[in-house]
Structure formats: C-alpha cells, structure tokens
Image (cartoon, helix red, strand yellow):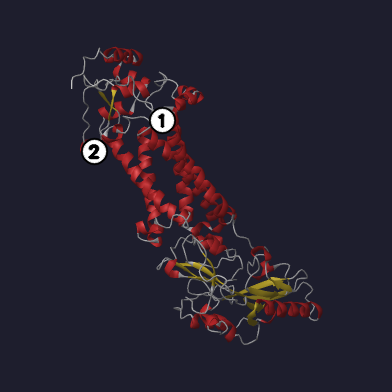
Amino acid sequence: MATSADRFVHRPNAIDRLGRTVIYTGELLRHPVYTRFLHWMVGIFFFLALLSGFGIYLPWIFRFFTPLFGGGATTRFLHPWFGLAFVFFFALQAINWLQVMRWTPEDSRWMKHIKQYVTRSDSVESPETGFFNAGQKMQFWEIVWGCVAYVITGVIMWLPEIFGRILVAISYVIHDISALIMLFGIFFHVYLSTFGEPGTIQAMTRGTVSEGWAWTHHPAWYKAVTGRDPAEALAEAKRRNTPSPQPPRTL
Amino acid sequence: MSDRGTLRIQQISAHPGPVAGEGAQRQDKVCKLIDTTTCIGCKACEVACVEWNDMPFQTTYFDNTYQTMPDTDWNYWNLIKFNEDQHDDGSFAWLMRKHQCMHCEDPGCLRACPADGAIVQYSNGIVDFQQENCIGCQFCVSGCPFNIPKFNPNTKKVYKCTLCSDRVGAGLEPACIKACPTGCLHFGTKDDMKFLAENRASQLREVSGFQNAGVYDPDTIGGTHVIYVLHDATKPERYGNLPAKPRIPLSFTVWKDIFKPIGLFGAMLGFVGVVMHYVFEGPRREQPTPPVVRIDPPPPPAGKEN
C-alpha cells in the first residue's frame, strides 16, 4: 500500500528540505514538511477567505469583519485573492494526496458502520482503516468539488461585464452554498483533530504521531508502515501497562 | 451625491436595524414622465445631464445610428435610444426612448447590495448611490432589470442617474426636464404624472389612432418613479430592450433574505454538533489509555475519634 509518508520519505522536494521532522521513539512519521506546509497555507487562506466572505455574505450580522480587512472596498478586493490562494494551495495538496484519497471498498464498508464511529462503540477503528478513513476522504472530495464551484462561480462574479447579470445571480447562490457546506465541515475537521481525537494535531505540527494513535485510529496504515499486527501491538501494550500493585502512598 | 438635509431616507442597503428618520416626515412620491410620442431625439437631456452632473465628456463613435453611444456609461447616465421599428404592414416607425435609471419602487440594485449605506432610497422614491460606501462588487448590476448601474474601473465604484436628487432636494426639477424643448418630459408627484400619462395615452388611442398606446409603469417591481407613455405598450421591448416584465433575480430576494440566514444557521449546527458530541460521547483516546492511578486521601490523623 502506498502511503503519502512512504512517498515523501523517499522523495523529499525543495520544501521538505527546508525543514525536518524528528521522529522520537514510539512515534511514526505521519505528514512530511511539504504536506504540513500546504495544510497550514490552505488553513490560513481558508479562514481569510471565510472571514472576508462573511462580511459580504450577511453584512447586517457580520459588519464587524470588514474593518479587519481595511473596510468594505478592501475586503471586496482581497476576498477573491484569498480564495485563489486557498484554491491554489489546496490544488497542490490534492495532487499530493490523490493516491491516498482514492475511494476503496473498505471505505464504503466504513460508511455503512459510521454509527459505530460516531458513538465510539469500539475502542479502536476497524482494522481496515488505512492512512485516511472514509470520513476524511469524503471531506477531501467535498473540498475538491467545492473549490471547483468556487473558482467557476467566483470568476463569473469577478468579471460580471463578461458573463452577464443572470449568470452572476446564479453563481451568487452556488458560491454561498459551497461556502456553507465547507463551513459546516470545518467544525468537524477542527474538532476531530483536537478535542475529538487527542494526539492528532501533532501530525500537522511536528509531523509525527504515536504508535498508539496509529493502531487506534488507522490500524491498516499502522500495519503497512510497521509490518506489525495492530491488534497484537495493542494487546502487548495493554499487558505492559497493567498497573502493578501500588505501594502504599506516603506523604 | 445628494443633499441629505432635505431628503428623508426610506431604505438603506445592507443596513442592520431601523432606518434613522424613516417616516419622520411626509414626502410626496416624485415621478418623471417621458412621453416617447413627442420626443424628437434632440439629445438636449443628454447634454443637460452631463452638464449638471459635471461629468467628464467621453469620446463617442459612429455606429450607423443616431444614438450617441451603444449604452449608458458610468459618466453618461442619460441616453436616447434610437430604434427603427417595422410595423406588421411593412411601414416603419422611428422609436426614440430616453433611457436612464427607472428609480424602481422595489429596487433590485438596493436588494442586491451588500455594502451598508451604498444604496439608499429616499422617501420621495429616488434611488441614489452613495459612492463613499460602495465596495465595487457590482452585485447591483446583477440585480438591476434595466442594466443601469455602470462600473468605473478606475475608482472601483458604480454610478448611475440620481434623478438629480440634489436638485429635487432643493425644490427644482431634474436637469433633463429643464432642458427638454418639446415638453415630452414632465416632473411632479407620482399621482399627477400617472394622471397626465393616462390622459395622454387615451388621447393617443382615441384621437391619434395608436390603439395599443399605454403607460409603462411595471408592477412586477412595485412600479417605477420614471414612467413612459408608449405608442404600443404591449411590446415595450421594441424601444431598445425595455423589459415588459422586469424582475429582480430570486438570488437577491428569496435566497438573500430568507435562505441565507437559514443556511448560516444550518452550517453553525456543525459547531453545535461537535460540542454535543464531546459532551455526550466524548473523545476517542488512543488505546490503551494510560492506567488510572487511584490516589486515596490520607487517613485521618490518629487520636481524633468522632
């Protein structure tokens, strides 16, 4: 199984060489420097585009956002450029991840059992879950198609004298819907990478995750990169962690 | 571009809360009446408009018609459209129509505008752009059924006819009205102009033989504060793309006013959802979780029973 980690460890590009990823004992490389760089560029421009867009979306609620960007006219000027930068960096990320984001039969099975994922009825993910689970892939493809919609409708609204008023009016609605779906999704993305699944965010900051995180959330990936069976590794860790009888506590 | 002192505001684009001064003073609805049947195409109104509004003149070009230029521009708000129209019997008519902002009662530009205070509607019905608040998004162009707002690429602002709100605010008629030599332009209250227009239309029908003569005051946008008397009111399109049923795109009415807030609420349910998930289900921690070490409180000091 090809993973993005495999590919980048062996073929680092110029941006990878600008930084480094330190892998401590008991950790696995999750995202190389290039992936992390793209992720944060996408994140920065996503939020800049989102906040500048809010001021235009519902000005009577979000009027306080426009002064942050230098007033209404400057917000209007900057928003398309923020959006283009977001789409540009996300396009690079999409190329970077195209291989690992491919939909597989395992993902379809994961979607059928999404209730177990949401209710946490199993303590670990199903052993088929690879580098990305189906939920992550769904969000990825939603953003891909959302970006396509953004660019087409955004360019139409940017150059109304070419496309005419009716196309602008239609684009206006599609652009909004795309943004609303992405806004809905960003809450899940941020929640699951921080509070929802502790230990995840370091994959995008330091680039590594603990082995325990790997066999808990992405067992098939753990198996692919370490060659060990995730269930056995977990059982062994449990034996190691069994608390020995505590000595009487002295104060 | 207006004298706020004497004009009361009725509607402000993208404005939160009530409109200051709304309903504080009774104002008559004003109206410009254009009788296309007595227009001779002299363009005095075009010149008066450029003169009064002190706009830089621009190069015009000849494209085999008498029309000054193909369409109005950011610095040319008033244009007579010349249309050669062939009747069913093969005869020709030369239709001339003074084209400018129609000052709709329900303005599509104002509905589409996302900039607070960039477009206002006065209590007398005049729709006016406030360029200092304009953000240059050009949504007003999309919202307007008459293709009136025009973008200046240098200033990144949109301009259009003000119905000489500065003159009207001071009790004068618009510059185009003052310049018209044939009396085909009239200015007054909406009721008076409507009365005058209907009288003229019935005269055209009964005396002059224009059986379809009528008044153009489309109710799809609540009527306009610029109305026409047309030789043939059943086919206004023949007067240079004057729409029979002008409409504001649903994007700026149904979507913007109703579904935008609902959509935002729906998207914010994602935030509610993840908070509820954390509270009700909790996080998935990596396995095995660190063993729980129980720390018992120290036993009470001896010798202090009960």
Q: Quadrant of residue B201?
A: bottom right
Percent position of residue B113, x then y: 50, 61
| Mark 2 neighbour density, 10 Å: few (under 14) some (14–19) many (20 or more) | few
B22 versus B284 height, above or below: below
Percent position of residue B79, x then y: 56, 75
| Mark 1 neighbour density, 10 Å: few (under 14) some (14–19) many (20 or more) | many
Distance CA(mark 2)–CA(mark 1): 23 Å
Q: Residue furthest right?
A: B206
Task: Identify residue for label 1.
Answer: A101
Task: Give the mark nearer the N terminus: 2 vs 1.
Answer: 2
- The amino acid type of the residue labelled 1 equals Met
Q: Residue at x 40, y 57 (%)?
A: A64
Tell whether B38 sits left or right of B163. right
Pointer 2 with pointer 1, Cβ within 8 A? no
Residue A21 visible in the shown view: yes
Q: Quadrant of residue A18?
A: top left
A216 versus A64 height, above or below: above
Between tags 2 and 1, which lies in front? 1
How many badges with numbers are in the image? 2
Q: Residue at x 57, y 63 (%)?
A: B108
Under circle 2, the secondary element is helix
Tell whether B188 sits left or right of A34. right
Task: Identify residue for label 2.
Answer: A14
- The amino acid type of the residue labelled 2 equals Ala
Q: Chain of mark 1?
A: A
Percent position of residue B6, x then y: 52, 79
B128 versus A5 height, above or below: below
Query: B292 or A148: which is nearer to us?
Result: B292
Percent position of residue B284, x then y: 38, 26
